[in-house]
């Protein structure tokens, strides 16, 4: 079992707490109805973070298994991130007809 540096674990914890806070606000204010893809993105990003923490703590950063796991999980997150960003931008900019006419 590989050990991760304390700074890395601290940053991972802070990132996870912030994302859990965002997910809590999305659910508490019922924004998951209006921003479903963004909600899915935040949840999947948390899942990926937990998955990679497990993989890196088991195999280390430089192992072939960790590299493969990281790169296999990344395309899904990037695709969902693209859809979430499009959803948020559409919601924010929907009143500006000139932007959508381009």
Image (spheres, rainbow, N blue to C red):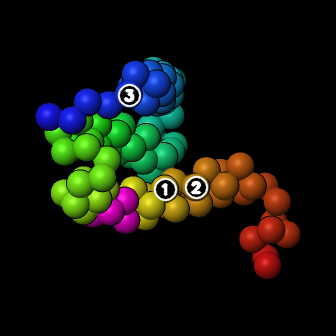
Going by the image, does 4 lie left or right of 94? Answer: left
> What is the x, y in percent for residue 94?
72, 57
| Residue that numbered label 1 is attached to | 81
Residues marked 1 and 2 touching at CB (< 8 Å): yes
**Dot label at residue 85:** 2
Q: CA distance from mark 1 to mark 2?
A: 6 Å
Task: Kindly report which numbered mark, 3 or 2, lies closer to the viewer in this rendering.
Answer: 3
Q: Which residue extends farthest right?
A: 98
| Residue that numbered label 3 is attached to | 5
> What is the x, y in percent for residue 85?
58, 55
Instruction: Give SS at disc 2.
Output: helix
Q: Residue drawn 50% across and 34% down?
A: 31
Q: Is residue 73 magenta?
A: yes
> Main structural element of the magenta stretch: helix, strand or loop?
helix
Q: CA distance from mark 3 to mark 2?
A: 32 Å
* Range of magenta residues: 71-75
Q: CA distance from mark 1 to mark 3?
A: 28 Å
Residues marked 1 and 3 touching at CB (< 8 Å): no
Q: Is residue 57 above or below residue 92?
A: above
Q: Residue drawn 32% across and 63% down?
A: 71
How many other residues sit within 10 Å of disc 2, few (<14), some (14-19) or many (≥20)?
Answer: some
Going by the image, does 26 lie left or right of 45? Answer: right
Q: In this rendering, does residue 91 appear at all?
A: yes
């Amino acid at each position: 079992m590989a050990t991760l540096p304390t700074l890395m674990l601290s940053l991972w914890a802070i990132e996870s707490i912030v994302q859990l806070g965002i997910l809590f606000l999305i659910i508490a204010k019922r924004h998951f109805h209006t921003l479903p893809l963004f909600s899915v993105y935040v949840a999947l990003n948390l899942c990926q973070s937990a998955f990679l923490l497990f993989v890196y703590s088991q195999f280390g950063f430089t192992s072939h298994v960790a590299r493969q796991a990281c790169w296999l999980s990344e395309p899904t997150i990037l695709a969902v991130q693209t859809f979430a960003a499009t959803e948020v931008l559409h919601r924010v900019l929907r009143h500006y007809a000139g932007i959508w006419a381009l």
